[in-house]
Image: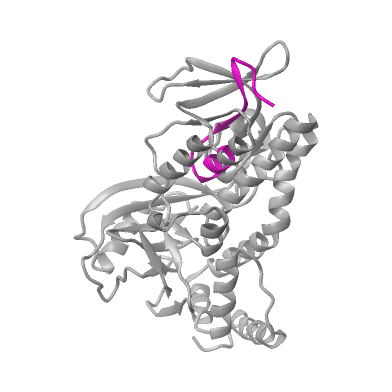
Amino acid sequence: MSGSPDGFDVVVVGGGPAGATAATDLARRGLRVMLLDRGGRIKPCGGAVPPKLIEEFAIPDELLVAKVRAARMVSPADAAVDMPIDGGYVGMVDREHFDAWLRDRARAAGAVLRRGGFHRIERDDDGCAVVHYGDDARDEPNFSVRARAVIGADGALSRVARNCIPAARRVRYVAAYHEIVRAPADATPRYDGARCDVYYQGRLSPDFYAWIFPHGDTASIGVGSARKGFSLRTAVCALRESTGLSGQETLRREGAPIPMKPLARWDNGRDVVLAGDAAGVVAPASGEGIYYAMTGGRHAAAAVAEFLRTGDARALKSARRQFMRAHGKVFWILGLMQRFWYSSDRRRERFVSICRDPDVQRLTWQAYMHKKLVRSTPLAHMRIFAKDMAHLLGIARV
């Protein structure tokens, strides 16, 4: 179906990975799509994209600014545990260029890209949604467009969600901040352009972690925390100092809230559905969001297409249902991990120690790379369970 002359079938609010993916999928279905992006802002993000994402969403190799072949976990006592990726790699992207490429792909598929900030949704005499938006530099909306459906993919503090789904106002967030710096010309004892470093240290984050992720010629140095009053900038400064990166040129600084739990409801029961950070789909414990944003955007697009085909608003619920069916168990497990292992430096020390185990490393990488809980030999799971219990009870050596 085509939209009316003064409107669109779908307005997608937010041009990040979730929104751009949804807009691309809907435009490829022949629907008239408007992608509204306010521009001029880059989300703080480590930029890791697993092979599953690269394959599923056809990401070209030239967008990968680095290929990581190992991760290093660093404990409160500064003990380092390396976790090599056996026969594979994790791609790294710079969100400034990655998100722009995704928006360009949506436009090439037929979506209309407009710059501006979402303000509110009202209804015309026929009950159709009227999306009001304004220039980035204006406080009041000066444009409006009709839409048969709206996808809110406008970030953790989504205006679409707050305008249409009241429960969205009660989401818990982790504040994230990073600095993009010029990477060292050569590898150093504390920096490797083919390795992601994750710091589980209370001095850097009392309830999450800090990171140094390579981006080719640059690196992302960041931290997350939900603790009010904790200085993220001070933590990043301390991390740079302790790793010999304080003298590297700082190219930009970015901060944003990151949700840590999917919303209980993603649609308004009428014509609006959420995706990406707006729906709360960032993995607990790891903070990974790009893959989940894009797959959530794809589910939102499929739900909207079915709604427009049938006129049955119940189809919008399938976005959350399909996402949670595929990833809900992983999110639940990661949430338990974060609440337990990140609660003190003593537990963080034991958590990093667990990561030395070859079975843990192998199953962790398999689950991360392929985005599902993998089946392994019962003996391997029994060994991991026994070792995990020993650490939980405090009887294992660290």
Residue 18 colored in magenta in the image: yes
Quarter of the rendering containing residue 219 = bottom left
- In this view of the protein, can residue 9 be seen by the observer? yes
At x 59% / y 77%, what residue is drawn?
363
Figure check: 330 above or below 270: below
Q: Residue 1 appears at what percent x and percent y?
A: 69, 27
Q: Nearer the viewer, residue 204 or 137?
A: 137
Q: Nearer the viewer, residue 340 or 212?
A: 212
Q: Magenta segment range?
A: 1-23
> According to the image, what is the colour scheme of the structure?
one colour
Figure check: 122 above or below 233: above
Q: Residue 8 appears at what percent x and percent y?
A: 61, 23
In screen coordinates, is 25 left or right of 188?
right
Q: Nearer the viewer, residue 318 or 180?
A: 318
Figure check: 61 above or below 315: below
In screen coordinates, is 70 left or right of 173?
left
Quarter of the rendering containing residue 193 = bottom left
At x 44% / y 39%, what residue is drawn?
104
Q: Residue 95 appears at what percent x and percent y?
A: 40, 49
In screen coordinates, is 321 left or right of 207?
right
Q: Residue 372 appears at what percent x and percent y?
A: 65, 66
